[in-house]
Image (spheres, rainbow, N blue to C red):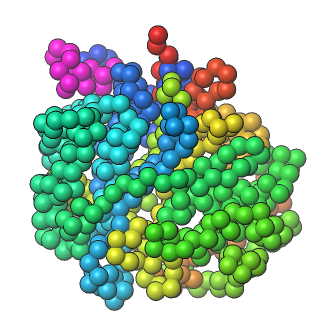
Amino acid sequence: MAVLLWTIAIALGIAPAGDPPAAEAPGWRASGAGGAVAAGKAGSVEAGLSILERGGNAADAAVATILALAITDYRSFCIGAEVPFLYFDAKRGKVEVLCGQGGAPSDPEAIKWYYENGIPRNGIRAAAVPGAVSLCFKALERYGTMRFEETAAPALALLDRGGEPWYGDLAATFRKLIETERATEGTREARLQAARDRFYRGDIADDLEAWYIEKGSFLRKRDLAAHVTRVEEPVTISYRGYTIAKCGPWTQGPYLCQTLRLLETFDLKSMGHLSADFIHVCVEALKLGLADRDAYYGDPLYVRVPLEILLSDSYTRIRAPLIDRKTASKEIRPGDPFGMKPLAKPVAPAPPDGGTTTCCVADRWGNVAAATPSGNPPYVDPPGGKTGVTHATRLSSLNTDPDHPNRIQPGKRPRITLTPTIILKDGKPIVAISVAGGDLQDQVTLNLILDFIEFGLRPEDAVRAPRFSTEHHQDSFNPKPDRSSTVVALGSLRVQEGVKPEAVRAIEERGHAVKTAPGPMGHPVMLFIEPGTGVIHAAGDPAAGRHAGAIERKG
């Protein structure tokens, strides 16, 4: 981290030029009472730690980490993409959600084109309004203490070292935002707003619109100008005395809450960690949660998502008996929350026809951020004209079924897989989790939550423990209108090496189609704040190339 701190000091004009100190790279785990970061590659962790070292809080450090991730973890996240963001604000004493997801073009003729031609899975017409930049400014304005200039310094240091052809253009864009922030009079918040508006309403938006027109995009400056980062209440449930906080049904996050509600009706601890009984029951609960996700979730600004019913005691009671302790389900079985029936008509699948990274930050004042920055590939290349702003292809997470809650509409947010998690105990944050891996994300999160709550594993053990998952669900990245044709693999169950052979055999005897995953299953990072001591333990799966770092308390 010494190299990056030195480079940032040079950029901010607070240190003399000269030879940099020797390089240091974060490892996969770390502990400290002064703050911690768990993210993607080492440079992103260094960026967040450098802000904590300079007295910034978790929001400041999270923004610095996210901006750096657009460079260090490019192809998993880009600055013109999206970031769902959970934040526990110690002053407010609660978790809030910032929606860093942009919507579809607002032009009705564009939407008509999608229904006539289909939503492409690549190219500029698959790009949503870029939401990550606005998210960063909103996080700083609402929770942070630093200027954008300070939090962008690590990313600029990375860009100025050189690399990709677009580095110079993106650095120039960041410097334009800093220029506006410096030139604006008034409060820190007013300066942040002015800089943000230059991107979405000023000359940067003009440059992006010119590039949109050149590339054949339906997006226009009016779409950029209309974009806002919404502040929302989290979706929460209680599980074994812990509060699980997730983003809303514009993500897949609430289905994890549904799954945990079902699993709370079973004595998982007595089954044993990674036993056949434990894995079987968890996977069957996941299948039911995923079925409801695919049937009912979408942007709640456009559709009624019956979340209150889906998470209710009564709905959980009628769904839980569908879990057969001895036999694997081979059907897609959404429930009927409107009629309060355990089953709607099962979906009969037809034969089947991402890029994301991670960010969790905690500071010494009790603030915690969990975010899942992502840029759905393939990217629109080359990046946005003069701006260096790469766009991803997130509109492919919508579809053109005219009766589906996740159908494309003007300005609508796609229902995304990105789904950070914060866990609270007695009203205080105790765990933060972020996972990369598309439809795997909340399945891996479920593994980590149960490892922690049911079996007492700390982050350094949980992120390396064998995991399991299923593809018994629709593909969230397939925009076909026939949703039955997007089901990936009925009855599937993947386990990582390390699950005992006798458990695998017993699972197979129940009808699961079991495969062993040769590499990492998802890319998780996890923070744990130790009650009493305040020491923060951070870890990222080393097999998945995740990094973590921490600092000691000062003063």
The residue lying furthest to the top in this view is 555
The answer to whether residue 222 of the structure is visible from this angle is yes
* Residue 361 in picture, x, y percent from top left: 48, 35
User: Which of the 4 image quarters holds residue 222?
Assistant: bottom left
Residue 539 horizontal side relative to residue 343, left or right: left
Magenta stretch holds residue 181? no
Residue beneath the point at 15% across and 71% down: 213
Compared with 436, 296 (above or below) is below
The residue lying furthest to the front in this view is 186
Residue 23 horizontal side relative to residue 309, left or right: left
Most frequent secondary structure within the magenta stretch: helix
Residue 359 horizontal side relative to residue 503, left or right: left
Magenta stretch holds residue 15? yes
Residue beneath the point at 86% across and 65% down: 325
Which of the two residues, 21 or 335, is positioned nearer the viewer here?
Answer: 335
* Residue 71 in picture, x, y percent from top left: 30, 43
* Residue bounds of the magenta highlight: 2-17
Compared with 455, 228 (above or below) is below
How many numbered marks, from 0 up? 0
User: Which of the 4 image quarters holds residue 296?
Assistant: bottom right
